[in-house]
Structures are given as structure tokens and as C-alpha cells.
Image (cartoon, rainbow, N blue to C red):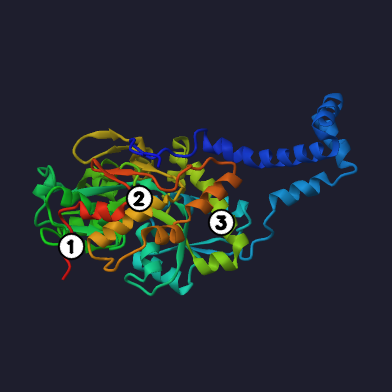
Amino acid sequence: MKDCISSHIPLPYETPPAAEAASREETLLQAVEDSVMHGLFGPTGRRSFLKALGAGAAATLVGGFFPLDAAKALALDATGPVEKADVRIGFMPITCGTPIIMAQPMGFYKKYGLSKAQLMKASGWAMIRDWGTSGQTDYSQMLAPMPIAVSMGLGSIRQPFIVPLMENVNGQAITLRKDHKNVTGPQDMKGFVFAVPFDYSVHNLLLRYYLAEGGVNPDKDVHIRVLPPPEMVANMRAGNLDGYLSPDPFNQRAVHENVGFIFKLTHQIWPGHPCCVFTSSERFAREAPNTFKAIVNALLDATAYSSDPANRKEIARIIAVRNYLNQPVEVVEQVLTGSFPDGLGNTMNVPERINFDPFPYHSFAVWIMTQLKRWGYIKQDVDYRQVAERVFRATDCAEAMKGMGMTSPSETYITHTIMGKTFNPADPEAYLDSFALKKQPL
């Protein structure tokens, strides 16, 4: 398996994604034209024909007796019309969902035939889950463990959900109340009250991992409560919280309001860790395949655009408005650009604070399941690979990326390093057994 222990998982966009997106359609049309020429004249005759007339005149002449324009149109619309243009997409007002959110005002959904796509803003993750399982939304932004939990019937009715795309990696932080500036590590956090956005969240799992690595039992030495991210700053101001591990922009908002300081970016705990994903019920993906393909392509395009640092300020301005994040543009820009005050008097420059990478590695799902089992959320034996491959559709994502002219990773299972400890997805039970601190069975 390919090792991946660099400072972050390499994004698949080695050239500026905006330029790739702009030329993708032209590349496809040129390929159609080249194929027609090749079929009519063969490789040698095609070259002579083009040399004699020039490419433009040759295409015009061929178009006179071959329906070249129709062939191009067919290539652009190979999957046929979408079954549902007015898809409903659940989202949370956090920067993790940047591609899902910006795809509406910036026209990415419309570009792929979803002219009436509706974004539905939720106030909490349980609402997102319930909308998705009840069919009130067609697609959803979810925290990476949520579709695994729903598919396994953990904490909710069991229903198969799939993840065709990741949304973001990194992008979270541990934020502490401003009177805790003397804290240096987990050993100073005993007795703290922390908030996380959901039980089935990478936030909960990473906070538990960080505390346990420092010898602090997350079930006995601290109190971890679930709180919707938009309520975290107010609760910290009121003294109800000592800290939280939260999605942005609420870490940066605490600094902006002089309520707290950024203690540690999750990038420092696990470089390139998963966070939010784009999900669909298995049933809807099967019953509306053209719609499913259209929205996956739209979000691949939007994720590529979001991954380019040159576009971050523009995106911040667009998604900060009331309909979406309802945050000061300055705060959103600080998160997306990675240039920000930390609340301790320092101006930080961390470009990898948040990244946007669409590839849902199977090994992400396996790691999540080891930690859900570690802390007692999964109580039974689990077939890690079977669940990972049914829920996280890495192979399908690779095919979709290829169809969009993008380069995808060659492996779906890779090793990851979390706080200096290597996770090998080939042996999840050995990894789980290696932890001294875990929930003891009753």
C-alpha cells in the first residue's frame, strides 16, 4: 500500500483547478472531433487532410456530411436529462461545506442541469440526519462518521447511505476559553467541559484521541457534550464550556469576539484528516442515476475550484452572507486563506488549515470504525472492509474524476499517521488493541 505520512494528503489538482474546469468541456469536444476525423480518414489520412485545409476548415467541411455538432452535443449530455432538477440538499452553515454551498450562488449546479437545486440550512446534525433518512432532502452534507452510523443503524433507524465524495480535509480546531491560556496539553484539561457537534463526528473521535494520548480518559476525566456549532461561542461566553473541538468558522469566531483562543488546529493532530462528506441514500442514487451523476460532477467541479487558494477570498465573500454562513466576511476569509489571528497575539499563516479533496479513501472509513468501536459506539464485531467499501465509494469517485479529466489516487487504502502513530488499515483490530485507553465493556 502507498504510504501517506507527509504533512497532508496531496490534493489531486496539480494544475490550477479553475483553468482545468474552464478547459474540460473544450477538451471533451476536441476529443470527439479528433475521433470523428480518425474514423473517417485513419491516422495518416487525417494528418494529411488537416495539413491541407487547416483544422477549422476541415471541421467545417466534415460537418457538411457528418453530424459533428450532434456528436458533440451527445458527448456533453451522454447520461441524458436529470430525473430531478429541483434536488434538495441539506447543509450546515460551516466552512467544511464550502463546495456544497458555493456551488449554488456560483452556478455549478445549474451548469450540470440542476437548475432548481435547493440548499436547506439545518441548525444541527441530528436534523441533517433526520432530513436525509426521512427523504426531506435528496442529498446531504454529513460528518464523515454519520453515513457509516446510519448504514449500521447506530443511533438511528438503519438505512443504507453512500459517500461518493469527500468535501474537506482538516478545517477544525480545539478552541479554549480565554481564561485557559496557561493550558499546555491534555494533562491540564482534567475536569473541563468540552463540546463537540455530534457523537458520530470526527470532532468527537479526534478530541477523544488527543485527550487519551495525553493520559486523560475522555469518559471519566472530562465531560464531553453535544452542541450545535452555531451555539458554541455563546455557550463559551456564558461560561458553560471550557473548550470545544468544532468546525469553523466558530473557532475563528471565538477569537473575533475575544471569547476564546485557538489552542490546536486538528491539522496538527492528523494532517489531512477527513471531516465532512457529501452523501446520498443508496436508494436515491439508484433510482435517479442521471441526477446523481450530475450532482457528483457539479461538486467535483466546485471542489476543484474551492481547492485553489487563489479563489478563497472570492468564495469567502460569497458564502459569508446570511443565507449561507451568516458570518463576518473577515472571519470566513481568515479560515479559508489560513492567515488568521490565534487569540494569543499571534498572526498565523497555515495554508493547509482547510483543504478540499473529494476522494473518500476507504482507509478513512476503517479508521473511523476503529474509533467508534474503541469508545463503545460499535459494540459488535464488524467487517471493516465490507462496510468501508459499501459506504465510502472511492472506486466510483475515481471513475467520476476520470470522466471529468481529473487525476485520482491510485490506492483506496493508505496508511495514516495520527499524533505520530501509524494506522495500517490492513489490520484494524491490531491497531484497536494497541490503545491502552478505551471504553471497557460492561
Tell me if residue 325 can be seen.
no
Q: Tell me the quarter of the image containing the N terminus.
A: top left
Which x, y percent locates residue 29?
72, 41
Instruction: Label 3: state its secondary structure.
Output: helix
Q: Is residue 366 left or right of residue 263?
A: right
Q: Please name the residue that numbered disc 2 is placed on.
A: 426
Q: Please name the residue that numbered disc 3 is placed on.
A: 295
96 to 407, vertically: above or below:
below
In the foreground, 393 or 130 = 393
Q: Which residue type does callout 3 highlight?
A: Ile
Picture residue at 68% right of the left edge, 42% below the top = 28
In the foreground, 114 or 433 = 433
Q: CA distance from mark 2 to mark 3?
A: 32 Å
Say whether marks 2 and 3 touch (CB < 8 Å). Answer: no
In the foreground, 193 or 268 = 268
Which x, y percent locates residue 441?
17, 68
Q: Earlier along the polypeptide chain: callout 2 or callout 3?
A: 3
Q: Is residue 299 left or right of residue 193?
A: right
Q: Please, which residue is most extreme toward the top here?
A: 51
Q: Which residue type does callout 2 highlight?
A: Ala
Q: Please name the residue that numbered disc 1 is placed on.
A: 439
Mark whose residue sits in front, 2 or 1: 2
Which x, y percent locates residue 107?
57, 50
